[in-house]
Image: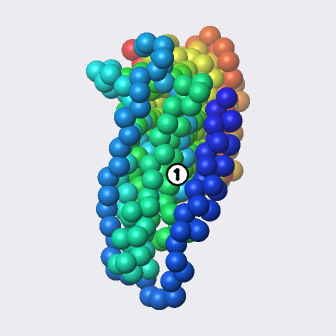
Amino acid sequence: MITRHIRIISALTCTVACTLACTLISAPASAQSTSTASVDRSVDIPAAKEKGAAERIVGEAVNGSFEIVVDATADAPRIEAQFTIDGTDEKDVKRRTELIKLFAERAADQTIVVQPIFPGKSMPRDRVKVRIMVPKCGDTSVRSANGTLSATGTAGKLKLIAKNGAIRIENHTGSVDAYSMNGAIDIIGATAEVRASATNGQVTVTMADNNDLPFDLETRNGAVHMEVGVGFDGIVKMHTTSGDLDLSDSGKRARTPQSSEHAKTVEIGAAGGTSEIRTTTGSINLTIRAK
């Protein structure tokens, strides 16, 4: 279902870009203007048909960050965007400012679809900060080519993808799937399965107490810091090509049946499911919280 909405967003981008391009008059090439403009846009989304239903969210941006926040006191979802608009000159900046759009609508299946849209070709200093506020959050999929992603107090299946930008997730209830090509990933208070992968960036994950579901963490150029809770029972396999491996276990709950310079298997408690941590050039630190 979320995949279908991502296709809708992609189609919408092409349609709007073509429409806006036809309205613009070509300007001669010139040095980039020192001017930019800032403008705010907001959209209030009608409450879901089903009272109290968790909101499903799909969002995408090229040059922008997303912040997803749950506000239990809110009556309905609200989307806010802060645009910074670039242009070839002051006239072009003014024209582009009049054409920017914050697309935010509720689809037929009640999913909230969000996409900030700049007119024509992307300019070097085009930026947008999007804030999505909902009373209750369900499955969410958000991606950005250039920008940070954050989610606080959300729930359901959470998928965040950033090409160039950091990812931060705090107090999420549900599974997490996070990927950043160039940026750090921080996940605090994970309550379910976690999958996090970074190409160039550090990965830091803290599991909530009583969460012993499997996790899979990987980074090529960066360290991994993993902290599991007091009640964690599982097998953790750590492997690094050229980094260090470190285990902190003040409660003496772990056993290491297999250990070498670049690989270590750690059995914790009853040693249930199997989790993995992999790095290429970064160190791995596994901490087991004690009572």
Q: Is 37 placed above or below 205 here?
A: below
- Residue 187 percent coordinates (x, y): 47, 35
Quarter of the rendering containing residue 32: bottom left
Quarter containing the N terminus? top right
Residue located beneath label 1 in the image: 61
Residues 192 and 5: in front is: 5
Q: Residues within 10 Å of mark 1 (few under 14, many from 20)?
A: many
**Residue at point 49% right, 36% down?**
105
Residue at the limit of the structure toward the front, as seen here? 23
- Residue 291 percent coordinates (x, y): 39, 14
Residues 236 and 10: in front is: 10
User: Can residue 160 be seen at all in this image of the molecule?
Assistant: yes
User: Can residue 252 be seen at all in this image of the molecule?
Assistant: no
Residue at the limit of the structure toward the left, as seen here? 73
Inspect the image, locate mark 1, and give the three-letter code of the amino acid beneath it.
Answer: Ala
**Residue at point 43% right, 67% down?**
96
Q: Is 256 placed above or below 96 here?
A: above
**Residue at point 37% right, 35% down?**
44
Residues 2 and 197: in front is: 2
Q: How many numbered discs?
A: 1
Numbered disc 1: secondary structure: strand
Q: Is 273 placed above or below 16 here?
A: above
Quarter of the rendering containing residue 109: top right
Quarter of the rendering containing residue 62: bottom right
Colour approach in the figure = rainbow
**Residue at point 35% right, 78% down?**
90
Residues 211 and 135: in front is: 135
- Residue 98 percent coordinates (x, y): 39, 63
